[in-house]
Amino acid sequence: MRLGVLDVGSNTVHMLVVDAKAGGAPTAMSSTKAVLRLAEQIDDDGKMTRDGADTLVSTVADFTKIAQSSGCGEIIAFATSAVRDATNSDEVLERVRQTSGLDPVVLSGVDEARLTCLAVRRWYGWQAGRILALDIGGGSLEMSNGVDEEPDIAISLPLGAGRLTREWITDDPPSHRRVAVLRDWLDAELKGPAKQLKSAGKPNLAVGSSKTFRSLARLTGAAPSSAGPHVQRSITQDGIRQLIAFISRMTTADRAQLEGVSVDRAPQIVAGALVAEATMRALGVARLEICPWALREGVILRRLDSEPAGPMTIEP
């Protein structure tokens, strides 16, 4: 079947068109993105602004037409942190439904962690043993630990790269003191959740997914995306620490010139690196493997799991 997957995130709205079948890996056919920065469109009352809602509604309508013209028999739509946090999300989503016909599901942070765990598990397989999975989004940080496709524990914290950039990094570049204070604050915020996560058991494999981890890995020497998804990529805590010392002294414009950092990610890559470093430190993880699958693939796989299995004949 051909599926459209609409991901309404804190930074971007992304329509991914895939060919997929139960028991097989989804194959991406096209990808369309729009940088809306919805998290920055939340006013002092916690509401998504009229401009933000108008842009979201028109973008979803346009992307729906793209998916339909691409032959998608079904469009799966979901929203994460920015819409979840907006106090008027029901009103905004009703406008989306009336304009596009789509009915996006607002995922909880824990659901994000669980679906990401599913994607990571399917990518690495059962031979990987217990997996610790980390994912840094624009609005939140998701973490899970488990031996199955459903994790033993799943946690979501409001420690996304975009959120922390808005709340903490107001100078360009940030001062050395500001970086140090944010690092100490993250250590305090992660102490309890890390203890809870580690109580589930020692992982055999630690994994990072999401664009933030992929960008950090590229900046520390991992293969570019053009090398394909099956090239092994990893990142170390020491590598991130050295990277922070380098990129935190650069302006946003200069960071945008680095290979592996897009213009829209350049403002928040320092905060993303600090979250990654602090999380690895809190969990006692020296190295992360980078998984090319994340939340979107988890959503697709969960949908495919609902498809009935084909007939099977066992010869005597």
Image (cartoon, rainbow, N blue to C red):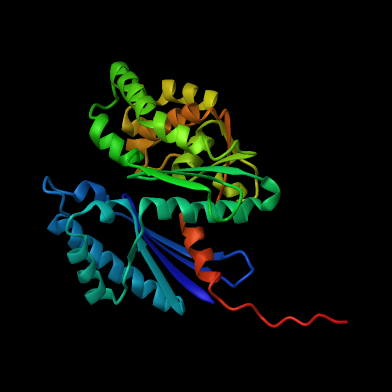
Q: Where is residue 34? Give x, y as percent.
A: 33, 57
Q: Where is residue 277? Give x, y as percent.
A: 46, 28
- Residue at far right of view: 316
Residue at 41% across, 69% down? 76
287 vs 141: above or below: above
- Residue at far left of view: 45
Q: Tell whether 285 sits left or right of 93.
A: right
Q: Tell whether 91 sits left or right of 315.
A: left
Q: How many marks?
A: 0
- Residue at far top of view: 177
- Residue at far front of view: 199
153 vs 270: above or below: below
Name the quadrant of the C terminus: bottom right
Residue 258: tell me if it is visible: no
Kindly indicate the quadrant of the structure image that contains residue 206. Answer: top right
- In this rendered view, identify the residue nearer to me: 184 or 262: 184
Q: Where is residue 130? Give x, y as percent.
A: 62, 44
Residue at 54% across, 30% down? 220
Q: Tell whether 169 sits left or right of 305.
A: left
Q: Where is residue 295? Give x, y as percent.
A: 46, 55
Residue at 85% across, 82% down? 315
Residue at 31% across, 51% down? 81
Name the quadrant of the N terminus: bottom right
Kindly indicate the quadrant of the structure image that contains residue 163. Answer: top left
Residue 135: tell me if it is visible: yes
